[in-house]
Amino acid sequence: MTRPLCSVMSLAFLSFAAIPSAHADAGWTDLGPVLELTPSIQGRYVVKIGVTQNQSGCRDKQMFYQDFSDRGADKMYLALLEAVSSGKKVRVFVTGGCELNGHSQISSVTIVL
C-alpha cells in the first residue's frame, strides 16, 4: 500500500470510529417530578422530567418523547398528565433510542405514590 492511500484509509477509519451512536442503553430512569408536558401537532408529546439518572446516553438527560401512534402512548400520556395534576413523581423506561433533538424515547411510565 502506498503512503498516501494508507493515510487516507487511516483517516477514514478514525472518522468512522468518532461518529456517536444514535442508539444506546435501555432501562429505567430514577424518580423525578414532571416539569413540563407538551403535546404537539407533530403526532408526539415531549415531557421534561427532573431525573438525574438516564442511561439512554441521549444528549438531553431530562427530555423524553413518545409518538401518539405507538401502542399505549395515550395511556402513558394520561399517566404523565396525572403526575402533573397530583405532583407525584414518575420514572420512565427509555428504549435507548435518541431522536428529536437528543431526547430519549420512552416505552413505559410509572407513577410512584
Image (spheres, rainbow, N blue to C red):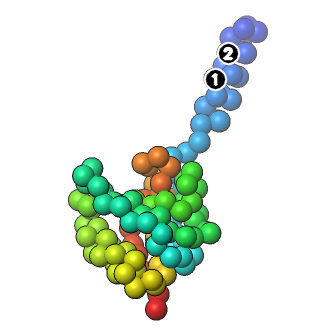
Q: How many callouts does the rendering have?
A: 2
Q: Secondary structure at mark 1?
A: helix
Residue depicted at x 30% and y 60%? 39
Residue depicted at x 29% and y 67%? 73
How far apart are the two marked residues, 2 and 1, measured between alpha carbons?
A: 6 Å
- Mark 2 touches mark 1? (CB < 8 Å): yes
Q: Is residue 17 left or right of residue 37?
A: right
Q: Residue 58 at what x, y percent from top left? A: 55, 53
Q: Residue 85 at what x, y percent from top left? A: 37, 81
Q: Is residue 44 left or right of residue 28?
A: left
**For residue 45, which quarter of the picture?**
bottom left
Q: Residue 95 at what x, y percent from top left? A: 45, 62
Q: Amino acid at mark 2?
A: Val
Q: Identify residue for label 2.
A: 8
Q: Is residue 51 visible?
A: yes
Q: Secondary structure at mark 2?
A: helix
**For residue 67, which quarter of the picture?**
bottom left
Residue 12: mark: 1
Residue depicted at x 72% and y 8%? 4
Quarter of the image that includes the N terminus = top right
For label 1, count other residues whose C-alpha is less than 10 Å away and answer few (under 14), some (14-19) or many (20+): few
Q: Amino acid at mark 1?
A: Ala
Rendered position, 98 above or below 8: below
